[in-house]
Image (cartoon, grey):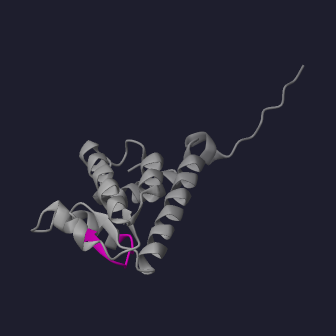
């Protein structure tokens, strides 16, 4: 009995996960598009530091980005300044300190009646898993995904 061999795409043989990385890149781009759209509509984005703000600017987020740790006042003063907004997006780092800060911001802002949106934080964290620990690493993460989707390693 003669068994025919199946022909496979050479890229699939050399880089079987290229399609996975292409899918992951598309999903991250969808999240970033949603972030860009919300930010351009006037929803402020809260990040931890200036490097996080610079990373979002590299990713073409043109709206208002507020740095929590770069302020001279206390955290409570920062939260009081957000009292006039209906909704804010929280995009803190993905480490333990960032999670605690996100939870604290959620609690304090909901006390003031400000809707805290952390769905983008959750989606980016789920897509990046352990590859990204902070917001400032997002541009290099996206470049790595692009390279892996093309079958190259960085």
The x and y percentages for residue 33 are 50, 69
Q: Which residue occupies 18% across, 61% down?
A: 75
Instruction: Give the camera-side residue of 152 and 114.
Output: 114
Q: How many marks?
A: 0
- Whether 92 is among the magenta residues is no
Q: Is residue 90 above or below residue 60?
A: above
Where 21 sits versus 44, above or below? Answer: above
Q: Position of residue 129 (x, y in %)?
A: 42, 43
Residue sitting nearer the eye, 143 or 137: 137
Furthest toward the right, the residue is: 1
When asked about the image quadrant of residue 91, the answer is bottom left
Picture layout, residue 14 above or below residue 53: above
Quarter that holds the N terminus: top right
> Does the rendering let one see residue 67?
no
Q: Is residue 10 visible?
A: yes
Identify the residue at horizontal 60%, vertical 49% (top origin). Answer: 19
Q: Where is residue 153 shown, x and y percent of the image?
A: 42, 48
**Residue found farthest to the left:** 72
Q: Which quarter of the picture shows residue 66? A: bottom left
Q: Main secondary structure of the magenta part?
A: loop
Residue for point 33% across, 48% down = 94
Relative to the observer, which residue lies in front, 6 or 29? Answer: 29
Residue 106: quarter of image: bottom left
Q: Which residues are magenta?
A: 58-66
Is 28 situated left or right of 59 in this image?
right
Relative side of 152 to 81, left or right: right
In this rendering, position of residue 14 left or right of residue 117: right
């Amino acid at each position: 009995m003669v068994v025919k061999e199946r022909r496979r795409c050479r890229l699939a043989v050399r880089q079987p996960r290229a399609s996975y990385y292409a899918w992951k890149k598309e999903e991250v781009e969808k999240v970033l598009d949603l972030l860009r759209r919300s930010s351009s509509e006037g929803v402020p984005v809260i990040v931890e530091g200036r490097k996080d703000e610079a990373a979002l600017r590299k990713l073409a987020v043109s709206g208002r980005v507020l740095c929590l740790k770069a302020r001279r006042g206390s955290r409570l003063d920062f939260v009081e300044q957000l009292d006039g907004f209906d909704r804010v997006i929280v995009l803190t780092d993905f480490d333990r300190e960032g999670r605690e800060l996100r939870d604290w911001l959620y609690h304090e802002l909901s006390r003031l009646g400000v809707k805290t949106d952390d769905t983008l934080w959750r989606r980016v964290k789920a897509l990046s898993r352990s590859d990204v620990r902070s917001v400032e690493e997002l541009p290099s993460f996206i470049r790595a995904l692009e390279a892996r989707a093309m079958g190259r390693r960085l």
